[in-house]
Image (cartoon, helix red, strand yellow):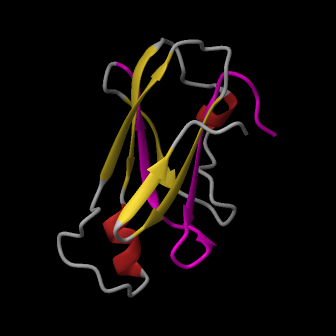
Amino acid sequence: MVRPGGISLHVFDVASGVAAAGLRVELHGPDGKLLASGAINAAGVLDHPTVRGEGLVATGIYEAVFHIGDWYRARGVPVPSPAFLEAVPYRFGVADLAQHYHLPLKMTPWGFSLFRGGA
């Protein structure tokens, strides 16, 4: 269940039609401090307390970093080194701590789409 006040990260590989289980991701707060780090689970989401709003203490610019190149290499996908999309940073604003910010990332080795979803 998604609750107000959190940030959820949902990652899906649209090239193969699967959730990006195992993809490493980091979430940094407005001060640059690491708030969350881990791997995307089998459902395609980062299972971390930030989803429940824990750790969000300020409005401002947050950054999620998705380690896409490593994920594709670990699956035997032939990507160059460095990959075209090695580590993708995404900066987004949190203006209201009572709202939930859902960020679905749709990716391939050569492109991505990331937006504020309505989970």
Dividing the image into 4 quarters, which one contains the C terminus?
top right
Above or below, comparing residue 101 to residue 111 in the picture = above
Query: Which is more toward the observer, 27 or 101?
Result: 101
Residue 31 locus on image (x, y percent): 32, 19
Residue shown at 62% from the left, 73% from the top? 18
Q: Residue at x 41, y 45 (%)?
A: 26
Residue 95 in picture, x, y percent from top left = 52, 13
Q: Which residues are magenta?
A: 1-30
The residue furthest right is 1
Residue pushed farthest left? Answer: 82
Identify which residue, 109 or 29, lies in the foreground.
109
5 up-or-down from 85: above or below: above
- Decide if residue 42 is on the left or right side of residue 111: right
The quarter of the picture where residue 91 lies is: top left
Of residues 109 and 33, the one drawn nearer to the viewer in this rendering: 109
Tell whether position 22 is magenta. yes
Quadrant in the picture for residue 54: top right
Q: Please check the rendered image and state whether residue 105 is part of the magenta-colored stretch, yes or no.
A: no
Q: Position of residue 66 (x, y in %)?
A: 39, 53
70 with respect to 20 (left or right): left
Residue at left offset 24%, top offset 66%: 84
Where is 88 relative to 14, above or below?
A: above
* Relative horizontal placement of residue 81, taking residue 16 as reference (left or right): left
